[in-house]
Image: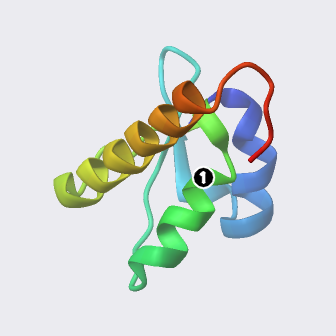
Amino acid sequence: FEAECEWRLIEEFGRESFQKQADGKLCFEADYTDKENLLSWLFTFGDKAVLLEPPGIRAQILAIASNMQKKYDTHGGGKNK
């Protein structure tokens, strides 16, 4: 996570839920039993978070982002659909 997300991680999981890295980013670790809740939660951070594992969910995030990009490319030009 980007450093600016620290307050949310503290509020939602406590100070012990992440480690500050040398580059200022936050390495957060938690267990999630519901994949859809995890994806929804991660997307609330926009581009301020990167899921490191598991690879299957990383691939799903990439697929969702790719589909979103295609929709925005297709419906570009400020048109709402």
Relative depth, front residue between 5 and 73: 73
Relative depth, front residue between 12 and 81: 81
Q: Is residue 5 above or below residue 54?
A: above
Amino acid type for the residue under numbered disc 1: Phe
Say which quarter of the image contains residue 3: top right
Q: Which residue is mark 1?
A: 43
Instruction: Specify whether 22 is left or right of 4.
Output: left
Q: Is residue 19 above or below residue 25?
A: below
- Kindly state the secondary structure of the residue where label 1 is placed: helix
Q: Is residue 67 above or below residue 34?
A: above
Instruction: List x then y, in percent, for residue 46.
Output: 64, 40
Instruction: List x then y, in percent, for residue 25.
Output: 55, 26
Residue extending farthest top: 23
Instruction: List x then y, in percent, for residue 70.
Output: 45, 34
Say which residue appears at 39% left-offset and 85% top-offset: 33
Say which residue appears at 18% left-offset and 52% top-offset: 55
Circle 1 crowding by C-alpha within 10 Å: few under 14, some 14–19, many from 20: some
- Number of numbered tags placed on the structure image: 1
Q: Is residue 58 above or below residue 76?
A: below
